[in-house]
Amino acid sequence: MPQSDKVMIVTGASRGIGAAVALLAARRGYAVCVNYRNRRDAADEVVRAIEADGGRAIAVGADVADEAQIVQLFQTVDRELGRVDALVNNAGVLETQMRVEDMDAARVARILQTNVVGALVCCREAVRRMAPRHGGRGGAIVNVSSVAARLGSPGEYVDYAASKGALDTLTIGLSKEVAGDGIRVNAVRPSTIYTDMHASGGEPGRVDRLASSIPLQRGGTVQEVAGAVMWFFSDEAGYTTGSFIEVSGGK
């Protein structure tokens, strides 16, 4: 395994896309912070898998809906791994499928707090460490958005889709704001990926139900999303910022 002194934080990395990104990043030579909210056992499993493959990783609990916990997360990484070079804003939540007419404000606020506010605060903490004026050496940020930002998720998750639309706007704005600091900001937009998130929305079999409506006629894998995420951190992506990769089977 190639070794480097580069450090990556992956939020929501105890399972699904986040875990796949953490594993691939470690294979590419990153020391990885596997962030989790409440699944410590699963995060520890990811760390053990990375270490068994010769990599370096730590599990750090923090709810990205809480600004103080985000600050503590970054401070822990500073102390245990070193200055962060790469951030993947993967942590995200959705709630049971529902029409807008049935949603209350508290539900929408919970989704926006994690998916938008949390991601923005993570970006803030990363820039404070990556920007040369703060003693950094540049870096890259990848936000895990969703094709829902384009399609709107009618009848299911309009609030979630709206949060991902905001994340896309954050990606574009921040990419222009920090380009002069040598920090690139991009996003991937997955769709219909086999993860546990669909169970959170009340329909564990959602991917199989929708497969026939996808041009490639199947759901995607977390490894396929992780590959797109990691391309943005590669040398080949050195001139790419404010951009998006659709990992959606053509949807």
Image (tube, rainbow, N blue to C red):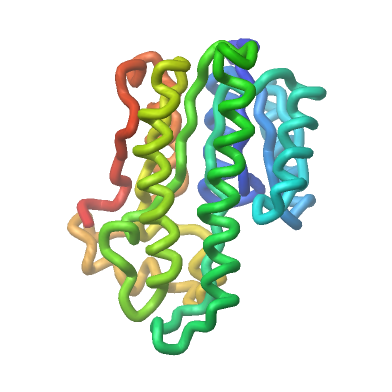
Task: Name the image quarter holding the C terminus.
Answer: bottom left
In this picture, is 147 found above or below 44?
Answer: below
- The image position of residue 32, as x and y in percent, is 66, 29
Q: In this orientation, which residue lies closer to the viewer: 20 or 242?
A: 242
Residue at x 56% of width, y 62% of height: 93
Residue at x 60% of width, y 29% of height: 126
Where residue 20 sits, quadrant-wise, is: top right
Task: Name the image quarter holding the N terminus.
Answer: top right
- The image position of residue 54, as x and y in percent, is 69, 20
Residue at x 46% of width, y 47% of height: 222
Residue at x 45% of width, y 46% of height: 144
Total number of numbered labels? 0
Where residue 13 sits, quadrant-wise, is: top right
**Can residue 127 be seen at all in this image of the molecule?**
yes
**Can residue 224 be seen at all in this image of the molecule?**
no
- The image position of residue 246, as x and y in percent, is 29, 45
In this picture, is 235 found above or below 195?
Answer: above
